[in-house]
Image (spheres, helix red, strand yellow):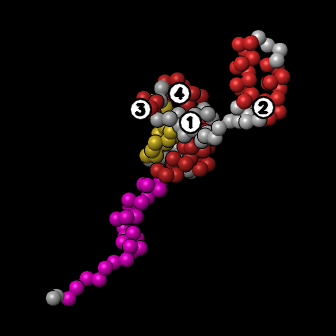
């Protein structure tokens, strides 16, 4: 058996090599742009738009349609000043239309999946109301009141 000539390298040492640093920098910049995009554009109700890239001091913002592009143009100078605060290297904005953004839905708030229940007090009011309405509506109101569990 021949003796191992190379010792294994630690992962930390591999990640600190120049090649990985060059890969990591654009990824960090993109993550920062994504976070900035969510923060800044949300303030102006432009969640359908996104900041896609930064090249030579030009922030590229895409909109899903010409209507959204028009809205972006209305806030162009406010957006530019906000972006300059966060990224001092931003010189100007380039606005583009990207119809593919229509298919991407903004993150919706999580809705509770729990069943809604009628309070006993509301059920009581519904049953009292059911006594003074026609038969057809009375049956439906009594079914609704029964959903509370206590009727």
Which quadrant of the figure has residue 16? bottom left
Question: Residue 134 sits in which quadrant?
Answer: top right
Q: Are marks 2 and 3 in contact (CB under 8 Å)?
A: no
Q: Position of residue 45 (x, y in %)?
A: 61, 33
Query: Mark number for residue 100?
Result: 3
* Quadrant, the N terminus: bottom left
Residue 130 at x, y percent in the picture? 79, 19
Pair 2/3: label in front: 2
N-term-proximal mark, 1 vs 3 = 1
Residue 144: image location, x then y, percent: 71, 26
Q: Does residue 71 appear to the left or right of 148 in the view shown? A: left
Residue that carries the numbered disc 2 in the rendered image: 151
Q: Seen in the image, is 115 located left or right of residue 129? A: left
Tell me which label, 4 or 1, sits earlier in the chain: 1
Could you tell which of marks 2 and 1 lies nearer the N-terminus? 1
Q: Position of residue 87 (x, y in %)?
A: 56, 50
Q: CA distance from mark 2 to mark 1?
A: 46 Å
Mark toward the viewer: 2 or 1: 2
Confirm whether the magenta stretch covers residue 148: no
Closer to the chain start, of discs 2 and 4, is 4
Compare residues 115 and 3 and report the one nearer the observer. Answer: 115
Question: Count of labels shown?
Answer: 4
Q: Residue furthest top?
A: 134
Q: Is residue 118 left or right of residue 74?
A: right
Residue at (55% x, 48% y) in the render = 35
- Who's the residue at 73% across and 21% down the image? 141
Residue 81 seen from this side:
no
Region rendered in magenta: 3-29
Q: CA distance from mark 1 to mark 3?
A: 14 Å
Secondary structure that dominates the magenta span: helix
User: What distance separates the C-alpha of mark 4 from that of mark 3?
Assistant: 13 Å
Instruction: Identify the residue under disc 1.
Output: 47
């Amino acid at each position: 058996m021949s003796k191992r000539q190379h010792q294994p390298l630690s992962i930390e040492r591999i990640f600190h090599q120049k090649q990985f640093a060059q890969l990591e920098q654009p990824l960090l910049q993109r993550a920062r742009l994504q976070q900035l995009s969510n923060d800044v554009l949300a303030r102006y109700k432009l969640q359908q738009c996104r900041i896609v890239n930064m090249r030579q001091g030009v922030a590229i913002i895409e909109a899903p349609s010409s209507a959204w592009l028009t809205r972006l143009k209305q806030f162009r100078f406010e957006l530019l000043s906000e972006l300059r605060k966060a990224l001092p290297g931003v010189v100007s904005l380039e606005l583009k239309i990207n119809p593919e953004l229509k298919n991407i839905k903004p993150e919706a708030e999580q809705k509770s999946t729990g069943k809604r229940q009628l309070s006993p007090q509301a059920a009581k009011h519904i049953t009292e109301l059911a006594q003074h309405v026609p038969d057809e509506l009375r049956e439906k109101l009594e079914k609704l009141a029964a959903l509370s569990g206590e009727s």
